[in-house]
Image: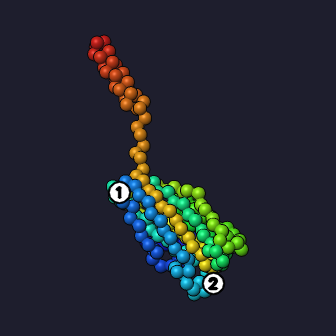
Amino acid sequence: MMPAVASATTQYIGSPVGSYDLTGASGSFTIEYDVQSLLPVADDFGGIDYFGFYWELVAESGYDYDITVTGTLFEGDGAAEFIATDYSASVGPEIGFGSAGSKTIFARGDYDTGINGGSYFSPAVSLLAPADSVSYLTVEFSELKSGYQEFTVSYASAAAVPLPAALPMLGAALGGLGLLARRRRRRDA
């Protein structure tokens, strides 16, 4: 599957950085990475504005899952800021920030605060992952510096939509009316 390019100037790093199987009715795991270890030389990409990489989240065939993701950007004490200028993270059925059906974890914004040791926390973002499907956790950024990122991913089988209690009663009532009408027609004949 080819990555869906979120903008004309986003360069993705080949294959997924990792793949995680969502197994059983529920579970959770943490994805941690240092950007420098994934892309040691940003200048190799020349005039590309954004760099991107992604993880696969593979749903088990027996369950529809509700996936919830939170993220944290960490800046190390005394180290350079995490990312300068733009950074984004999203989860969705396609690869790429802003792709169809994606949910934003971190929006692009100015993370070049000049404050070492700061942290940025995302709200919890939820996505429905149908059974036997693949979802993608995507990161895109520009002006690479040093720093650390963490995502917490939890998942649980999506509850079946409950049948409204009135629906069986409505069916029984309509069936009863049908029987009454049939008896009346027989009696009148």
Would residue 8 be visible to someone looking at this image? no
Residue at the image position 58 percent from the left and 65 percent from the top: 72
Visible in this render: residue 5? yes
The location of residue 49, given as percent across then percent down, is 63, 78
Horizontal side, residue 187 vs residue 93: left or right: left
Question: Residue 33: where, in percent of width, then height?
Answer: 52, 73
- The amino acid type found where label 1 is placed reads Gly
Residue drawn at 64 percent across, 78 percent down: 79
Q: Quadrant of the N terminus?
A: bottom left
**Could you tell me how many numbered marks the image carries?**
2
Residue 24 bears which disc, if any?
Answer: 1
Label 2 sits on what residue type? Gly
Mark number, residue 117:
none
Percent coordinates x, y for residue 35 in the rendering: 55, 77
**Residue at the image position 57 percent from the left and 86 percent from the top:** 41
Cα gap from disc 2 to disc 1, whole angstroms? 44 Å
- Image quarter where the C terminus lies is top left
Residue 63 vs residue 138: left or right?
left
Nearest the camera: 154 or 65?
154
Residue at the location (63% across, 65% down)?
120
Q: Earlier in the sequence, mark 2 or mark 1?
A: 1
Judged by depth in the image, the label closer to the viewer, 2 or 1, is: 1
Give the answer, above or below, for where 150 lies relative to 186. Answer: below
Query: Dot 1, crowdedness within 10 Å: few (<14), some or many (≥20)?
Result: some
Q: Name the residue under label 2.
A: 47
Q: Which residue lies furthest to the right in this view?
A: 114
